Image (tube, rainbow, N blue to C red):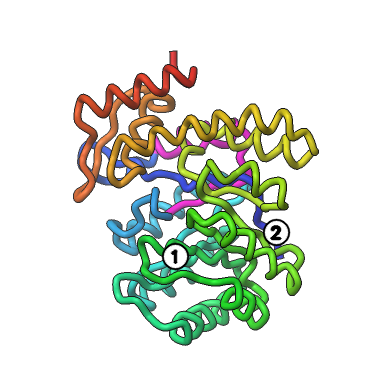
Amino acid sequence: MKRLCGVNPPVITIFDENYKIDIEASRRQADFLIEKGVDGLAYLGTSGEFSIMTVQEKKDFIHEMTRYVAGRVNVIVGVGDTCLENTMELLTYVESIGVDGVLLVNPYFSVYSTDMVEAYFKYVASHTRLPIIIYNFPDLTGYCFNADVVYDLVKNNPNIVGIKDTIADFNHLLSMQKVKEINPDFSVFCAYENQAMGLLACGIDGFINATANFAPEYTVNTYQSAKRGDFNEAAVWFKKMVEAMDIYTYSTPLFLACKQAMYYRVLEQDGHERLPGMPLDAEMKAKVYNKMRELDLIG
């Protein structure tokens, strides 16, 4: 089974003036990220606004992007939903078109017990051969996977191969290393840039972090420098990763400011947002623009 690791930006979804997914702009974005050295593209995560798309939209989008990426890097797809039937429909489809793995969030809004969450993951894992990355985001789902739960899931479901641990608790990510006792290739992915340096020193396997949408070279160079043992070089790029986090403070949810930063750098024009998302106001756009200039990401 293919190992999923390295830098995999949680790719934002670009909408056109009719609030439809803009495939041409998405291709430009994919080319930009691949040229900057990412290992994979993680579509339909939180930053990809999966929760405001229909299943058919997701299928059409992933079909287009998988065909366009054409094996240049891994394609990972978020298949989570509050409805199991929707999850399975999308999962079956993306497996049929040859994606490299899926990101699976537990059902959210209603908070389920651990037994229920484990039963859900066991069911999904037993119906696919694709590698599954658990998506742990307790601030949004209301449920937090601990290391014991993940250990049991991996022990009983060999195609559960990693976790994206979107949590501010550094030690929580470290605790996931326990799972490597079962599968040494189990991958722990970090989401928050300010955790990167310490986690790399402790053997973290990769990143699925939102600033990699507009500043992918920061994360790529931090990761690659650390992997070859050059932590002095890694520290230089790590500082830039942390500085780029300022973009997060310019919108709620934070991915809207990340989108604006990408518009400035990649599209060189404003994009369009689908409700409930709305474009940044002039003041926040100016802050994003000035920060991007400060970071020397735009001229």
Is 31 within the magenta? yes
As drawn, 180 above or below 164: below
Residue type at mark 2: give it.
Answer: Arg
Callout 1: SS = loop
For the point 40% across and 59% down, which residue is it? 59
Q: Quadrant of the N terminus?
A: bottom right
Callout 2: SS = loop
As drawn, 32 above or below 9: above
Per the image, the residue denoted by label 1 is 79
For the point 29% across and 33% down, which residue is it? 271
In x, y percent, where is residue 298?
44, 18
As drawn, 5 above or below 292: below
Is 22 within the magenta? no
Distance in Å between CA atoms under marks 1 and 2: 19 Å
- Residue 173 lies in what quarter of the image? bottom right
Task: Tell whether 207 sits left or right of 109.
Answer: right
Per the image, the residue denoted by label 2 is 3
In x, y percent, where is residue 127?
54, 80
User: Residue 120 got which mark?
Assistant: none
For residue 139, say whether it is visible.
yes
Give the residue furthest to the top: 299
Task: Tell whether 247 sits left or right of 101.
Answer: left
- Residue 170 lies in what quarter of the image? bottom right
In the rendered picture of this protein, how many numbered marks are placed on residues?
A: 2
Q: Residues within 10 Å of mark 1 (few under 14, many from 20)?
A: many
Q: Quadrant of the C terminus?
A: top left
Residue type at mark 1: give it.
Answer: Val
In x, y percent, where is residue 21?
32, 45
* Segment colored magenta: 24-44
For the point 73% across and 67% down, which residue is it? 180
Mark nearer the N terminus (1 vs 2): 2
In x, y percent, where is residue 11?
45, 45
